[in-house]
Image (cartoon, rainbow, N blue to C red):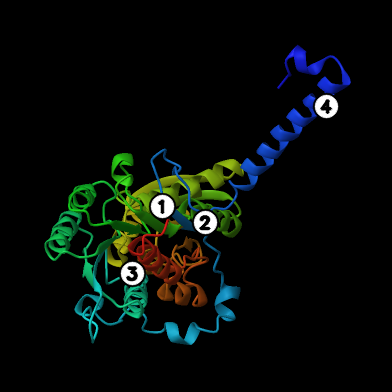
Amino acid sequence: MPLPDSISQGSTLKTMKRNRFLSLILSALILSLTSCGDKTANTDNDEDGGTFTGEFIPCEHYFFADAEKDPNRESFTGASSGDDAESRGAASGESKGTIGMTCMNLNNPFFQLIAQEMEKAAKAAGYTLKAMDGKGDAALQNTQIDEFITQKCDAIFLNPADSRATGSGVRAAHAEGIPVFTFDIQMEDPEVQKLVTYHVGSDNYQGGRLAGESMMKATGGSGKIGIINLPEANSCKKRVDGFKDYLRENNSTLEIVSELNGKGDRVKGAEVAADMLTAHGDLVGIFGINDPCALGAWASVKEAGKLEQITIIGFDGSPDGKIGVFEKKLYDTPMQFPGQMATKTVEAFLKYAAGDDL
């Protein structure tokens, strides 16, 4: 930027002023750059333009080589059975209060782990966690939030089945003065985002880019591919966006010929994968927005006798997904960190309850 003539020309004194002025500009620029680089740091605005307070946790690749040396691999077997998190809740002894939690699907091992870790962290702080299964139904989740309000819960932890439709529940809780903390999936409406106290989630866009990178590597970057998506979930839309952007930015000739909604479910994932294979028998790859969808797709690909032809990429790094990578059903499952997501959500609530800044 050119400086005014009164500063850029003249005496030695004016030159010194000019140098000081430039130094201040440079310092401010450096400060602004160093404050923008941390994806996990708190921020005031999210990438969609809404008000946002929270943090994103970067994802990591999980390949066969990672599965081979994973010290926890043996413990993954049977991970999807789990116990019923919804049946737990009341901790023994006196409780400081109750936190209501509802997530999209407690049959998913990913959310089972989050519920378990949230309960553990809440209990350690003297609170009771009441976990409810939203069963992929936004209307049911809004009803559950109403129940939490009636029960005068101290906070609500929400993983929305639908990023927009659960907005009415958030508004109702806010109207009653109950803080809402979202995890994994953000609310989509910027006005509703302003009512959320704090959000903790994965960097889903970055994770989607990892999936795109793996798809290009496994397929050689050419051929027809399909995507099993979940457009109701903001996080899953970002995964798909990151996946597509990586392909485009790296001049991939992969052609996305089918995008179908697998509802985040293994059975539905298998169904839509079968539909893809019927319409496009020459597919070379399928990206599933979570591990259940990807593993469902694998079952259909196996049924069609095309395991040697089609590469499947999952997402989550769930216990079942990691087993799938080790058994070479999945090429990669960009890994989230649900344990961190759970504990950071509880920590944010405890800070809020103590009156500390978030």
Q: Which residue is mark 1?
A: 227
Q: Point out the residue furthest to the top here.
A: 5
**Image quarter of the C terminus:** bottom left
Give the numbered dot on residue 158: none
In the image shown, does 204 or 101 lie closer to the viewer? 101
Label 1 element class: strand
Q: Which residue is mark 3?
A: 111
Counting from the top left corner in percent of width and height, residue 286 is at 44, 57
Residue 186, compared with residue 333, is above or below; it is above
Q: Nearer the viewer, mark 3 or mark 4?
A: 4
Give the numbered dot on residue 40: 2
**For marks 1 and 3 on the same chain, the one whose residue lies earlier in the sequence:** 3
Disc 4 from disc 1: Cα separation: 60 Å
Residue 246, compared with residue 13, is above or below; it is below
Residue 88, compared with residue 102, is above or below; it is below
Label 3 element class: helix
- Give the residue type at disc 3: Phe
**For marks 3 and 4 on the same chain, the one whose residue lies earlier in the sequence:** 4
